[in-house]
Amino acid sequence: MSSGLTSNWSNFPKHRAQVFSATKADEVCTISQNVHEFIARGNGRSYGDASLNDAIVSTLNLKSPFILDEENDIMIGGSGLLISEVLESLIPKGYFLPVVPGTKFITLGGAVAADIHGKNHYEAGSLANYVVAFDLFDGEKIVTCNKDLHSKLFFETIGGMGLTGIILQVSISLLKINTAFFKVKSQKIKDISQLLDVFEINKKSGYQAAWLDIASHQTGQMNAIYTYGNFANVAELDENQMTNPLQNPIDKKFSVPMVMPNFTLNKWLLKVFNFAYFHLHQPKSNIVHLDKFLFPLDGMKHWNRLYGSNGFLQYQFVIPTGQFAEAVEPILSEIHKSKEKVYLAVLKRLGPAHKNAVMSFPIDGYTLALDFKKTKGIFTLLDRLDILVTNAGGRIYLAKDARMSAEIFSKSYLKTVSKNPKFASLLSKRLGLN
Ligand SMILES: Cc1cc2nc3c(=O)[nH]c(=O)nc-3n(C[C@H](O)[C@H](O)[C@H](O)COP(=O)(O)OP(=O)(O)OC[C@H]3O[C@@H](n4cnc5c(N)ncnc54)[C@H](O)[C@@H]3O)c2cc1C
């Protein structure tokens, strides 16, 4: 057991916690006998307080088993395995996870607990569609769950943010691939309705997202770079790529060496960066390793340190398709009226919600993720945005949240998981889930 200040990816909030580590299922049961209330923590890649509490059980060392069942195209993995570790084994065998988020440094347990979505959500849905079964420690015993066996617990756990228990191992059905390369196209767009049209045209196949320069927004207009990609065929690869179509990426990553001073990122740097990024971008069509397209932010390790010791907040919301174009204008105006700056903005198209996963985030609509520095004024601004988002029928992603009120939560998430007094987090207490 260790103890100290703990935080997740956005370094806000920081909470003094006792962290227990388990390497096997029975160790989780033993810890539970001695700790009154706790929460599972995977790799701390949620942004806010979802995996924080006074007592935390780190699942990072629950790495076994790892089994690839090629007869049924299924993998079984310990919940502490990172997606990066799993992909390293799967890709050379011609397999991939059907849903991946924007970083591969999350655990399988964290992926299930957040019911992650990717750039292909419209077509593929969330991870809930591919979870075959898992073993869960429910505070008393280990329960094997699938859609037929303990099905209520199964669908409360997927997207349940760790509040139903500790996932010990999980089996997931896999996607077969012929290459580890993506055929990628990008396009500069300045008109918001044109951008949404492009998303609609391509939504039924492939992976898509857009980078937005929020500061450039004027009613109906905004600088955006839209990217679309899909797995390339062997015949589309160049000579070099063809020597090993199912290769893992070469690990050449730049790392931010330390937590930077709080002034490192500022509005002037942001303006220059956004201007240059948009205007120097050459629309192109090319073939790149899937890592470059699906996990671009992983190219810079510890990029969260750029925000300094105060940390930052990501505000990710989804608004139903029909309401988005109208609702986004007042949201962006509210941001412009405040002094707060958006340092990164990404737009994605989500498809229909999962029918059974109780607290899963995605609904048919557009999801916008906005990164802000943690300043004095940010909380007032985000409280105002909450009202605009929920009035438009939208909701905020729990895996990114650090400050939403219980009232806003209950207005936008109509169903919640059953209470289990053993499992609680700062997030669940704040949202009135315990
Ligand atoms: C750069 C970046 C990009 C991202 N992009 C996306 C994206 O595109 N789509 C998306 O959906 N998400 C995205 N995320 C969010 C991320 O996928 C989720 O927050 C995920 O849950 C993090 O997993 P983790 O292993 O780090 O878990 P943690 O952050 O440690 O925990 C997250 C939640 O999972 C629970 N949990 C973790 N392990 C277990 C377990 N074994 N049993 C039960 N509960 C458990 C925790 O209690 C907590 O509620 C992104 C995050 C980052 C940093």
Image: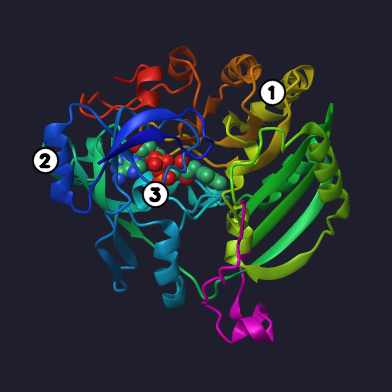
The residue that mark 3 highlights is: 129
Circles 3 and 1: CB distance less than 8 Å?
A: no
**Quarter of the picture for ligand 1?**
top left
Q: CA distance from mark 3 to mark 1?
A: 29 Å
Query: Could you tell me if residue 116 is visible in this image?
Result: no
Q: Element under label 2?
A: loop
Q: Quadrant of residue 55?
A: top left
Residue found at x 27% / y 67%: 67
Question: Magenta span covers which residues?
Answer: 230-256
Q: Position of residue 355 (x, y in %)?
A: 39, 37
How is the structure coloured here?
rainbow
Task: Work out how far the residue at label 2 is from the one at label 3, CA to CA, in angstroms.
Answer: 26 Å
Q: Which mark is residue 256?
A: none
Q: Residues within 10 Å of mark 3 (few under 14, many from 20)?
A: some
| Numbered mark located on residue 327 in the image | 1
Q: Amino acid at mark 1?
A: Ala
The residue nearer to you, when weighing 44 against 289, is 44
Circle 1 — which element? helix
Q: Nearer the viewer, mark 2 or mark 3?
A: 2
Q: Which amino acid type is shown beneath numbered disc 3?
A: Asn
Q: Which residue matches tag 2? A: 141
Please state, as top left, top right, bottom left or bottom right, where the N terminus lies in the image: top left
Q: Going from the N terminus, do you reach mark 2 or mark 3 first? A: 3
Q: Is residue 102 above or below residue 377?
A: below
Q: Reply above or below: 115 against 314.
A: below
Quadrant position of the C terminus in the picture: top left
Q: Position of residue 285 (x, y in %)?
A: 76, 66
Measured from the top left, where is residue 184 in percent x and y?
69, 63
When asked about the image quadrant of residue 374, the answer is top right
Taking the image as shown, residue 329 lies to the left or right of residue 409, namely right
Q: Is residue 406 visible?
A: yes
